[in-house]
Image (cartoon, rainbow, N blue to C red):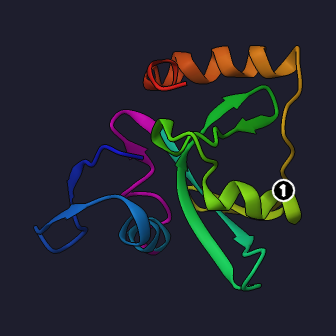
Amino acid sequence: MSEQTQQKAPGTGTDITLIGDEHVRIYRETNGETGYLWNGVPILLFTSKGRKSGKLRTNAIIYTPVGDKYVIIASKGGSPTHPAWYLNILEDPNLEVQIKGDVFQATARTAESPEREQLWAEAVKAWPNYDVYQ
């Protein structure tokens, strides 16, 4: 995510920038009360295993609910390379996902055509910037 948003940290009156590790920390502490909505779009947390380190890594990412699926886009802000987390889940697709206070296990997969185009269209409706930097 390349943009940042300011919110008040609960009980502190202090502005915080929600992105990266700080976003994950506050989202977890508040069960998504702070950090679930980011620039008007919903955010989930997912934890995957690092393919090189074996360490668990948690990321905050925009998601789009489509039916019973949770669609995330491995865009890395339009970079020509994949985000590290995407490479991690290609190797081990087993994830822990948190949406607000709901935590559950999930298995990630990369969508293929024609489903990919349908899911992409839904994701772009939710976050039009995806189309800008595809």
Q: Residue furthest left?
A: 13
Q: Which x, y percent locates residue 126?
A: 51, 23
Q: Which x, y percent locates residue 16?
A: 21, 64
Observer-nearest of 129 and 18: 129
Q: Which x, y percent locates residue 95?
A: 79, 64
Please, what is the dominant secondary structure of the magenta stretch?
loop
Residue at point 60% right, 24% down? 123
Residue at point 51% right, 47% down? 43
Observer-nearest of 52 and 28: 52
Label 1 belongs to which residue? 90
First to last magenta residue range: 29-41
Count residues near mark 1 (Cα–Cα under 10 Å), then give few for <14, some for 14-19, many for 20+: few
Asked where in the image residue 91 lies, by quadrant, the reply is bottom right
Q: Is residue 93 visible?
A: no
Q: Is residue 31 above or below residue 55?
A: above
Observer-nearest of 59 and 84: 84
Identity, as a three-letter code, of the amino acid under mark 1:
Leu
| Residue 38 belongs to magenta span | yes
Observer-nearest of 121 and 77: 77
Residue at point 65% right, 14% down? 121
Q: Is residue 121 visible?
A: yes
Placement of the C terminus among the 4 image quadrants: top right
Position of 14 with respect to 112 (left or right) is: left
Q: Is residue 50 above or below residue 113?
A: below
Secondary structure under the numbered disc 1 in the rendered image? helix
Residue at point 39% right, 55% down? 35
Position of 133 with respect to 2 (left or right) is: right
Position of 10 with respect to 47 (left or right) is: left
